[in-house]
């Protein structure tokens, strides 16, 4: 009887842990935790004076298998554009937006996330990279995240300002730095995949790396760190 009680208690604990499951969705499909999601569906309309208006609006949801009234959802645009997140309430815009949502057991809430911009031509449409995170209250074990790359087939993300440049191009990174700069690239799970020193101007080849989001660090006059999308 005692062994049975222990087994039942263990089962109850496992059920309790499982009941804290939290997931992002694209439509009805679960987005894998810590993954990269590419979205290239653009809504393009004609604007005033020959301008082009582009809207990028993936069908994103957040769901859970238990009731919660304090799930914090954050969307942070690492490529610098102003994005919008509604998440079941008043819409907010900025490069980083955090909303608190209430979820019913087995239900989902539409994040109503999108980017909209007006440009001279379609060639100017940016690649918009956004990090999403969600967590149920202070329960660290429920935290889920993913990186969304929109319009990944076009353009790049400039990651150094002023007189320096570090711009992803097809198969590499085009750079221009004033002094020798140490470059390190890491996968999104923290594995170092490239380390070298650049100087002057040129193209750093990344053709052997899979396309996707990487973490970079730069040591030198162009010292900086962040994320970059390679294609």
Image: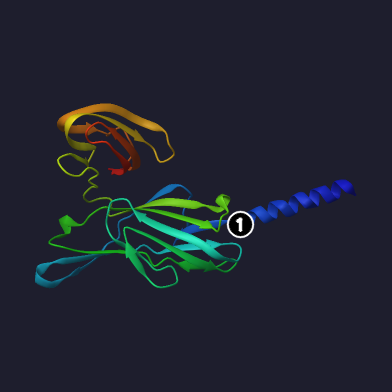
Left or right position of 2 against 174: right
Instruction: Indicate how the structure is coloured in the image.
Output: rainbow
In which quarter of the view is residue 171 placed? top left
Q: Is residue 10 visible?
A: yes
Residue lying furthest left in this view?
49
Residue placed under numbered mark 1 in the picture: 20
In which quarter of the view is residue 88 placed? bottom left
**Residue at screen point 28% across, 26% down:** 196
Comparing 174 with 222, the one in front is: 222
In the depicted structure, whether residue 216 falls above or below residue 11:
above
Residue 9: x and y in percent read 78, 51
* Element carrying mark 1: loop
In the depicted structure, whether residue 86 falls above or below residue 181:
below
In the depicted structure, whether residue 87 falls above or below residue 144:
below
The quadrant of the image that shows the C terminus is: top left
Disc 1 residue crowd, few under 14, some 14–19, many 20+, Cα 10 Å = some
Residue lying furthest front in this view?
221
Residue 25: x and y in percent read 46, 59
In the depicted structure, whether residue 123 falls above or below residue 87:
above
Residue 197: x and y in percent read 25, 26
Q: Is residue 169 visible?
A: no
Left or right position of 30 against 86: right
Counting every numbered tag in the picture gives 1
In which quarter of the view is residue 190 placed? top left
Residue 228: x and y in percent read 30, 43
**Residue at screen point 18% across, 33% down:** 203
């Amino acid at each position: 009887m005692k062994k049975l009680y222990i087994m039942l208690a263990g089962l109850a604990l496992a059920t309790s842990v499982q009941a804290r499951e939290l997931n992002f969705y694209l439509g009805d499909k679960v987005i894998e935790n810590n993954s990269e999601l590419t979205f290239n569906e653009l809504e393009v309309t004609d604007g005033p004076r020959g301008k082009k208006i582009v809207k990028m609006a993936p069908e994103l949801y957040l769901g859970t298998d238990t009731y919660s009234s304090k799930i914090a959802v954050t969307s942070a645009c690492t490529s610098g554009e102003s994005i919008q997140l509604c998440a079941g309430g008043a819409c907010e815009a900025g490069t980083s937006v955090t909303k608190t949502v209430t979820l019913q057991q087995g239900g989902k809430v539409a994040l109503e996330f999108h980017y909209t911009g007006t440009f001279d031509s379609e060639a100017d449409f940016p690649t918009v990279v956004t990090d999403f995170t969600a967590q149920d209250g202070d329960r660290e074990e429920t935290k889920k995240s993913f990186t969304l790359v929109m319009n990944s087939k076009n353009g790049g993300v400039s990651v150094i300002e002023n007189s320096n440049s570090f711009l992803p191009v097809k198969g590499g990174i085009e750079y221009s730095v004033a002094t020798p700069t140490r470059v390190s690239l890491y996968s999104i799970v923290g594995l170092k995949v490239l380390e070298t020193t650049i100087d002057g101007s040129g193209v750093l080849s990344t053709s052997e790396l899979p396309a996707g989001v990487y973490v970079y660090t730069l040591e030198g006059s162009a010292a900086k760190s962040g994320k970059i999308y390679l294609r």
